[in-house]
Amino acid sequence: MSTWSLEEWEGKANTDEHLVTYQLHITLQQAQQIRVGCLARFLFPAGHYLYTGSARRNLSARVRRHLSRQKKRRWHIDYLLMASAARVTAVGLFSETECRCNQRINGEILLSGFGASDCRAQCGSHLKYLGNKADK
């Protein structure tokens, strides 16, 4: 597992073509009710989240897009990341598949189907809630 700060991740992504999966470490500073595309309107509790996604090409462009606040909402994660209380704190980069990386995380699934519309491994969600402890 390789997790990088927001200042360091892009250099790593650009130098290793085997990296295809990313994990965004997200802090939601206060609970927020967010409508997530056609999934639902959902009250996300404050705390720490981990979102797993992939990009077969242009991994760094995909992650940069997620980090931007100026974008059209296209993926489920866009709705969460555009919330005023949401902050990405670190980025993990992996050569393993999206589902394999996601399944290693012991977090709680709060919203079924989030980021997992095309999941074939029955992950349930590619967003996991890790809790609200300050040491995460």
Image (cartoon, grey):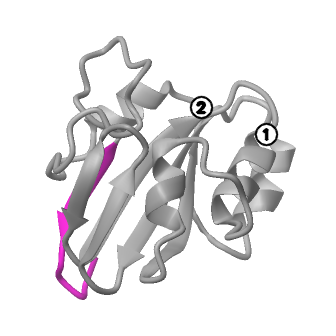
Q: Is residue 14 left or right of residue 63?
A: right
- Write down the region rendered in magenta: 127-136
Residue name at image x 47 percent, y 30 percent: 98
91 lies above or below 37: below
Q: Is residue 3 left or right of residue 124?
A: right
Q: Earlier in the sequence, mark 1 or mark 2?
A: 1
- Residue type, mark 1 in image: Asp
Q: In the structure shown, which secondary structural element does the residue marked by tag 1 occupy?
A: loop
119 lies above or below 113: above
Which residue in the protein does label 1 denote? 16
Q: Which mark is residue 95?
A: 2
Q: Quadrant of residue 8?
A: bottom right
Q: Position of residue 99 (x, y in %)?
A: 38, 26
The one of 1 and 58 positioned closer to us in this rendering? 58
Question: Exactly how many numbered labels are in the figure?
Answer: 2
Residue 1 seen in the current view: no
Is residue 120 one of those drawn in magenta?
no
Q: Which mark is residue 31?
A: none
Q: Position of residue 59 (x, y in %)?
A: 74, 40
Q: In the structure shown, which secondary structural element does the residue marked by tag 2 occupy?
A: loop
- Residue type, mark 2 in image: Ser
Q: Position of residue 64 (x, y in %)?
A: 74, 58
The one of 62 and 99 positioned closer to us in this rendering? 62
Residue name at image x 27 percent, y 46 percent: 40
- State if disc 2 and disc 1 touch (CB < 8 Å): yes
81 lies above or below 76: below
Q: Quadrant of residue 39?
A: top left
